[in-house]
């Protein structure tokens, strides 16, 4: 059961990552904030590489399912914390 939940969370994390990349690189991005958009992309890609990708590999090889679930749940939590910090930093 934990394996299935982890796979679902990993899939949702992957979709969110792709949507964030498309949203930041899309034509609606403001030219004045292009640098901040690229920094956000680096953070999202790094966060995905550090949390969801290892989680998916662990579940794929049927190893450490509970820590894999914790890793996959860390992605949205850290993403929300970074978003709140970015909003608070802007004037």
Image (cartoon, rainbow, N blue to C red):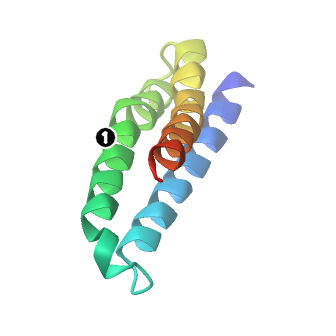
Report the residue at 30% width, 80% height from top.
Answer: 31
Q: Nearer the viewer, residue 53 or 27?
A: 27
Residue at 60% x, 14% y: name it: 66
| Residue reaching furthest to the front | 91
When the figure is inspected, residue 12 is found, relative to residue 46, above or below; the finding is below
On screen, residue 86 versus residue 5, left or right, reads left
The secondary element bearing badge 1 is classed as helix
| Residue that extends furthest to the bottom in the rendered view of this protein | 27
Foreground residue among 84 and 88 = 88
Q: How crowded is the residue under tag 1: few (<14 C-alpha within 10 Å), some, or many (20+)?
A: few
Number of numbered markers: 1
The residue lying at 31 percent from left, 59 percent from top is: 36
Image coords of residue 32 (percent x, y): 30, 75
Give the camera-side residue of 23 and 50. 23
| Residue under pointer 1 | 46
Q: Quadrant of residue 46?
A: top left
Q: Percent from the top left, x then y, of residue 39? A: 28, 53
Q: Quadrant of residue 48?
A: top left
Is 35 on the left-hand or right-hand side of 50?
Answer: left
In the foreground, 38 or 89? 89
The location of residue 42, given as percent across then percent down, is: 28, 50
Q: Position of residue 86 (x, y in %)?
A: 46, 46
**Residue at 38%, 38% in the rendered image:** 47
> In which quadrant is the N terminus drawn?
top right
Q: Quadrant of residue 53?
A: top left
Look at the picture and state if 35 lies above or below 84. below
- In the image, residue 1 sits, relative to residue 14, either above or below, namely above
């Amino acid at each position: 059961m934990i394996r299935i939940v982890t796979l679902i969370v990993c899939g949702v994390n992957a979709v969110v990552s792709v949507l964030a990349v498309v949203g930041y690189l899309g034509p609606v991005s403001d030219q004045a904030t292009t640098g901040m958009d690229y920094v956000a992309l680096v953070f999202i890609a790094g966060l995905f590489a550090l949390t969801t990708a290892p989680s998916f590999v662990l579940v794929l090889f049927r190893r450490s399912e509970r820590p894999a679930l914790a890793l996959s749940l860390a992605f949205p939590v850290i993403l929300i914390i970074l978003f709140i910090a970015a909003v608070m930093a802007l004037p």
